Amino acid sequence: MTNNVKNEAVLDSAHVGDIRGAFGTIRHGDVAARNSVWQRLRTLLAILGPGLIVMVGDNDAGAFSTYAQAGQNYGTSLLWTLILLIPVLYVNQEMVLRLGAVTGVGHARLILERFGKFWGAFSAIDLFLLNALTIVTEFIGITLGLQYLGLPKEWGVIAAAGLVMAAASTGDFRRFERFSMILVVFSLLLVPVFMMVHPPMSQIGHDLFVPGMPAGGKLSDVMLLIIGIVGTTVAPWQLFFQQSYVIDKRITPRFIKYERADLWLGIVLVLIGAVAIIGMSAALFAGKPEFGNFQDAGAVAAGLSKYHSRLAGVLFAVALIDASLIGASAVSLSTAYALADVLNMKHSLHRKPSDARAFYLVYFLLIAGAASLVLIPGVPLGLLTNAVQTLAGVLLPSASVFLLLLCNDKDVLGPWVNGRWTNLFTGLVAAVLVLLSVILTASVLWPDISSQTIVNVLVGGGIVGGIVVIAAHVVKLRRDAETGADLAEEAKPTKLYMNTWRMPPLAQLKPMVLSRSNRMWMAVLRGYLVVAVIMVVYKVTQVALLGQ
């Protein structure tokens, strides 16, 4: 079955047309077979972008800080967490790229349409607030890099904000993607820094694949850092960004396999950057007074200059600014896409600002607001950074739950719905994220929480979560067997059907019917989010006003 464009859920007409990527063009309606290696390579080059940008954007200013802290305070002992996060990264981002290519509708709008106004408004408003704070941390990263390089902070921040605004407002999608890909290439400046410091590769290889905890490290502090690594690697904005960017790039189901390859390339770059920062920081400060006393990414650049060379420090500072620029750009876009999607406004980089005023206004205001906030004397930037990490931890479970439910909605994804093993794995991941979210929230609200309490929560919560997920999976298998769903799944759809199936217009979708168990868990999730957000806001306000 082939759906016509008029029978697809296209919310902005600019989302239909030729794929004009940074490295090539694919004509709209191109259904030619890609049989030769050269043809496939050319197609991949045209598709490259969404996965690379979202993943390299993941190694932003916050990631620089978190990874450098892990290396400076605990050596390479936490490298193994990165390997464990690879399947989590791929599964989460693969699901949203599938949603984008098949539905043509952004993540926030799908939540609104399928789960109602409360969850739609909740996801859009919380994403806006969290992303606004995240963009502030990106500009904090820019100021740290500028200060190390000896450049004036005020003019540098203004120039950075202007550059990010200008790159997205040309009305030419290809120009923005080429700008982003230049930033992606500059992220590799971390590799020569790593090679200059020359950490012991045997130790890095061991700690990457053999899990262990830092000797003598306080468990509560180590756990918070591990959660910080998870939070910087699996952030809610990534889900919203890649789904909308795939749509704006006009990628259809026919090219999903190429977009998956793009995603894998992005994950490789994320891993390279993270290993480089942790390994370099560990080797640089080992045996030095600064070991175990992390300050910020700017101090790491200063340490490179002190213990190695000025060139190494400059390269690290430039990489930090580069990471902050791509982070600020991607996070701002994810917010503008989401709000315009929910409010049914034009939202495409193919349009000039005069043709999508509200979309670009949100983008510009976020950038300008964050840049201005960083330049105001006395603003508690450290407090804002902590608030970002905490709120991200609180929102992660809801993002994962909605993603899992949407990818099992046959009215939305048709033949592209999740398979059984993907569901089981994603369910376990969601349970772990909920557990980490609870620990993170509790540790911020009660800083003196004991190591034994954290262990009890991890063990008890892990056992309960695993039982719940596996039990739910077994119940679903039995229900499918009773209803004959297994037989239906055996009839594999044809390649042509898969490549041409698109979600029908939103108005034609049947109302989503949640099972009793799903409604119960959604109610529990809503209660947890409300309580957790109120407690976090109270704690942050208390610290800001009373210094407690």
Image: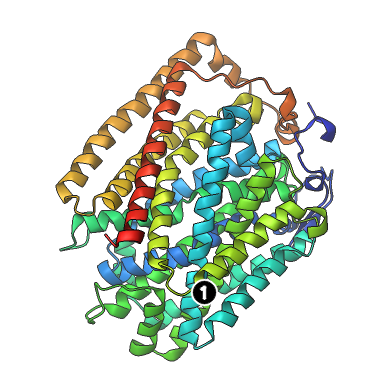
Q: Quadrant of residue 164?
A: bottom right
Please indicate whether residue 16 sits to the left or right of residue 206 in the image. right
**Local secondary structure at mark 1:** helix
Three-letter amino acid code at the position of disc 1 = Leu
Please say if 432 is above or below 272: above
Residue 197 is situated, as x and y percent measured from the top left of the image, at: 37, 81
Q: Residue visible at 67% across and 72% down?
A: 162
Quadrant placement of the N terminus = top right
Nearest the eye: 132 or 461: 132
**Does the image show residue 398?**
yes
Please say if 507 is above or below 201: above
Q: Quadrant of residue 100?
A: top right
Please indicate whether residue 262 sits to the left or right of residue 297 in the image. right
Q: How many marks?
A: 1
Please indicate whether residue 272 sits to the left or right of residue 414 in the image. left
Residue 173 is situated, as x and y percent measured from the top left of the image, at: 76, 59
Q: Quadrant of residue 354?
A: bottom right
Please say if 245 is above or below 167: above
Q: Residue visible at 32% across and 65% down?
A: 70
Q: Residue visible at 40% across and 43% down?
A: 533
Where is mark 1, residue-wise?
375
Residue 399 is situated, as x and y percent measured from the top left of the image, at: 49, 40
Nearest the eye: 223 or 36: 223
Q: Residues within 10 Å of mark 1 (few under 14, many from 20)?
A: some
Q: Residue visible at 43% across and 90% down?
A: 310
Q: How is the image coloured?
A: rainbow
**Does the image show residue 257?**
no
Quadrant placement of the C terminus = bottom left
